[in-house]
Image (cartoon, coloured by chain):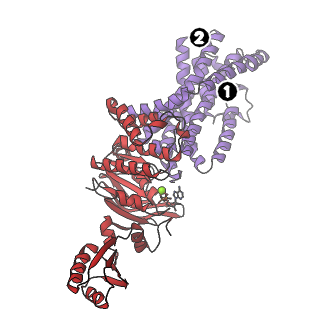
Chain colours: A red, B purple
Amino acid sequence: MFAVETLNLSKRYGKTDALRGLNFTVNEGEIMVILGPNGSGKTTLLMILCTILKPSSGTAKVVGIDVVEEGTKVREVMGIAFQEARGFWRHKPSSILKFHASMFDIDPAKRQDLIERTMKDLELWESRDKMFMHLSGGQAKRLETAKVLIQQPKLAIFDEPTSQVDLRGKRKIWDKIRELRDQGSTVIVATNEVREAEYLADRVTILHQGQRVVCDTIPKLKDAIAGGDIVEVDFEDPVSGKLVKDLNGLGGDVSLSSEGNQLRAKVSRAEDWVPKMTSASYVAGAKIASIRITEPSLDDVFLHFTGKALAGQP
Amino acid sequence: MNRVLTLAAYNVRILLSERTWFILAWALFGLQIAVYGSLMSKLVSTTVPNYLFFYGVGLMVITVFDSGADVGRHFVEHAHEGELPYFLSLPVSRGGFLAAQAIYGVANTMIKVLPPLIGVLWFVGDLTIQGAVFALISMFLLGLGITGIMVSMSFIAFKSVDIYSAFLAGLSALIVRFSTVFYPLIFMPSFYSPISVFSPLTYGADLTRWVLGFDPNFLLNPILAAAVVTGVAVGTLSLSARIVDKVIEGVKAA
Ligand SMILES: Nc1ncnc2c1ncn2[C@@H]1O[C@H](COP(=O)(O)OP(=O)(O)OP(=O)(O)O)[C@@H](O)[C@H]1O
Ligand SMILES: [Mg+2]
């Protein structure tokens, strides 16, 4: 059984098609990152999964339970940290978390401890006596994340958990999200930040204009781009034409260019190509000084599959 | 069930933190009764004996109406401050969510109405536990009905809060003026007494007066009044349960 499964899921707001026939699955116990630019339908999808919005057509199931038919049961097994931290203007962080914990039947004996620990982990402890409306944007987002961490739901959903959060905070949140997965939760993270996806994802679903473009592990997505890895090799002597010819003869999907002592190769899998290249160079008597392999980023992957750059990227 | 209560308790706690409002509401009530009520009572003493009592109950019914409207506003505020999606993501059924709102509304109403009720009954020299309890039940049912109407109307607020406010102001004026809160039905001119039939306050006010022992000649048939008040409560609450489900679609996904 999938932790989440949508079939032909569509959502219309008036004239806007936010989701268009989306088929999407998440396996139990993995971190699935939904990567997509602004307006691609990430939040809409998550709002349908947590039963706040209803699909216009198609179905969605969470741990096998239909989100429309049995909404209350779905809400019992999941927790969501919203993209915009939500309300409770005149309450303090600790009482907001207490309320949340009590709604999800967290053992009262452990509640206080858990809340204190989570607040300290997310560096919220110093702001414990401020009212919600006086928290900074980043602090409010941390609090939003803390709700779900305390809850430890079967399915944990985070909608852009680190937008507005500083770099240190991002790391903390990411580590806590991974910890949540290691303790058995299935996790969905929506983001438009490549770095967040790279750090967290067991698998990535790329969403574009309400449709799934592709879904796979990050290494496989990168491999799927022809000429995926870039290998830069420095030789001790200038690169000879013969060497280039030899290396071209190794086969595979390779394009080479050389300048002075340096050779640049775009290959689909550096792991396969580099060993062949080193032994061919050795045979040709060309001494290697250094090798650098750079991977394409998820930006390149996104660009490759959609023909467009991710929001905010050049 | 437990969760519904937790949710309701959360709302009520916020309510209790707004003590000043209650004190103000009670003071205003006292002022209205003391000045307007007693003066009018003298003026009309030949046609309606004990008008002060009649008026006192009418004023309580208006208080019930206002606090029902408060719940509607509270609900709309939730939606606009972004709390609504959070509440809707909690493991409570939609019916349970509404029940929590209704409990909040009832608590709000009771706090506002109980001291005036005891005050009026004591002042008129008619204070019995029985009377007070039945009057509370009658106003409680009316309050549920008003809450139901207000929450049902809240879908308008998702098109525009301005239209909602304007609509509510208009609606309250109509519902209050064309009801029997201030004047007995039998004195209403025939050209607008038919309209008063459409105001739930007519039934709530007359029922409350009846249980408090006011002269039945000035009132509606109590069985009819009780039936309508109960019917409105049940009907509008189930209507609002349906509407809550639909309304949410209007909330911006963000
Ligand atoms: N309540 C609404 N009414 C009308 N259109 C809406 C509503 N909510 C979302 N949309 C539209 O649906 C599309 C998808 O929006 P959604 O919020 O799901 O995108 P997103 O991927 O979460 O974007 P972001 O990265 O900016 O958060 C957008 O075109 C948006 O304008
Ligand atoms: Mg979004």
The chain to which mark 1 is attached is: B
Say above or below: A297 vs A259: above
Where B24 falls versus B248 (above or below)? above
Please, what is the three-letter code of the amino acid marked with disc 1?
A: Val
Earlier in the chain: of badge 1 and badge 2, it is 2
Q: Which residue is mark 1?
A: B181
Q: Nearer the viewer, residue A41 or B100?
A: A41
Relative horizontal placement of residue A9, taking residue B158 as reference (left or right): left
Among all residues in the image, which is located at the extreme right?
A: B43
Q: Amino acid at mark 2?
A: Leu
Does dot 2 land on a helix, a strand or a loop?
loop
Residue B179 in which image quadrant: top right
Q: Chain of mark 2?
A: B
Q: Residue at x 41, y 34 (%)?
A: A98
Say which residue label 2 marks.
B127
Report the side of A160 relative to A256 (left or right): right
Residue A290: x percent and y percent?
Answer: 30, 74
- The crowd level at tag 2 (other Cα within 10 Å; few <14, some 14-19, many 20+) is some
- Expressed as whole percent of the image width and height from the top left, the position of residue B233 reads 52, 33
How many numbered markers are drawn?
2
Measured in 3D between alpha carbons, the distance from the residue under mark 1 to the one under mark 2, in whole angstroms, is 21 Å
In the depicted structure, whether residue A159 falls above or below residue A253: above
